Image: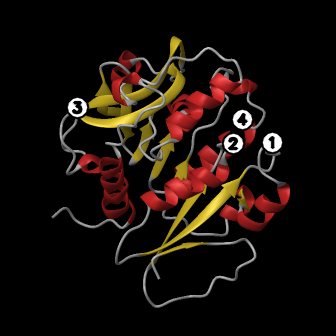
């Protein structure tokens, strides 16, 4: 069966083979692009995976039609009727707001609390990671003077973590955010481990004792996503630097260094294999 996107109107039929259910709370404005990126990351040969895209009930998307969301997305209350094996919460373009100022913050807090009791493993991406760290561990984000924007090299600080099995020291991943998490706050929290970091971009992957992963970058990004973000902001007249280490010879009209996809794919496969499927280490 492979990967199947479950529609809210579809009836679930029991199957003899194991079916793993992954929920994705998609908070990104370009929802269909994010859907494609994450579905590609979650392809896993030989396993049956159902993906449930989730929407917020207290917020109406400005970029995606209500009809599309009703036909393709579940509400959070519907999630309670599905036995989810793992969940992904994406980033959102609200990072300059205090968390309590975000219009759907109360609903997201309810979601976080439900997850902690009912879902064994999770990946939080970018703002989603910052929001979860704030809710669970009272770690706030800090506004950067310059946007962390580009392709960055990363160190592996906790080699025993199976999420990064097969990745080599100095792997690359994209970042796109105006805020960061203080390294010291991670070290002072007795429930968190720093798994990977960048000397330029700061923390990249943080893990807690429940196998929740807080990923501050965007390994799932497609080749041209940063390029599209750059030219979008240029067209809006916004001040933005060329994404670091991303274009060959820093030429926005040139080729992109697409050197992170295989590592990102390995990371998501490791998440599925060791934290969702619960396979033993080989």
Q: Which residue is mark 2?
A: 29
Q: Which residue is mark 3?
A: 157
**Is residue 1 in view?**
yes
CA–CA distance in space, label 4 to label 3: 32 Å
Which mark is first along the chain, 3 or 4? Answer: 4
In the image, 59: left or right of 186? right
Task: Name the secondary structure under disc 4.
Answer: helix
Q: Can you name the residue that lies furthest to the top here?
A: 145
Task: Name the secondary structure under disc 3.
Answer: loop
CA–CA distance in space, label 4 to label 2: 17 Å
Camera-nearest residue between 1 and 79: 1
Camera-nearest residue between 55 and 264: 264
Residue 267, given in percent of the width and then of the height, sits at 33, 51
Q: Which mark is residue 62?
A: 1
Which mark is first along the chain, 3 or 2? Answer: 2
Q: Can you name the residue that lies furthest to the front here?
A: 253
Q: Which residue is mark 4?
A: 105
The residue that appears at 54% across and 53% down in the rendered structure is 117
Task: Name the secondary structure under disc 1.
Answer: loop
């Amino acid at each position: 069966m492979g990967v199947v996107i479950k529609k809210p109107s579809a009836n679930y039929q029991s199957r003899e083979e194991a079916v793993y259910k992954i929920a994705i709370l998609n908070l990104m404005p370009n929802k269909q692009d994010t859907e494609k990126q994450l579905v590609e990351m979650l392809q896993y040969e030989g396993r049956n995976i159902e993906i449930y895209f989730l929407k917020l009930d207290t917020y109406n998307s400005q970029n995606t039609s209500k009809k599309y969301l009703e036909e393709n997305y579940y509400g959070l209350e519907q999630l309670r009727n599905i036995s989810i094996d793992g969940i992904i919460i994406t980033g959102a373009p609200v990072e300059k707001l205090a968390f309590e100022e975000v219009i759907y913050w109360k609903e997201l807090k309810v979601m976080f609390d439900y997850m902690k009791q009912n879902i064994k493993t999770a990946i939080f991406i970018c703002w989603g990671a910052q929001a979860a760290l704030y809710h669970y561990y009272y770690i706030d984000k800090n506004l950067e003077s310059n946007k962390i924007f580009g392709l960055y090299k990363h160190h592996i600080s906790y080699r025993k973590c199976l999420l990064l099995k097969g990745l080599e020291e100095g792997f690359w991943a994209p970042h796109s955010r105006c805020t960061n998490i203080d390294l010291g706050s991670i070290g002072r929290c007795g429930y968190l481990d720093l798994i990977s970091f960048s000397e330029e971009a700061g923390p990249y992957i943080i893990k807690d004792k429940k196998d929740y992963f807080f990923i501050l970058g965007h390994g799932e990004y497609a080749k041209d996503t940063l390029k599209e973000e750059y030219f979008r902001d240029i067209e809006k007249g916004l001040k933005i630097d060329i994404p670091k280490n991303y274009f060959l010879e820093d030429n926005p009209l040139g080729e992109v260094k697409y050197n992170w996809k295989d590592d990102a794919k390995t990371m998501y496969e490791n998440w599925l294999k060791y934290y969702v499927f619960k396979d033993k280490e080989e």
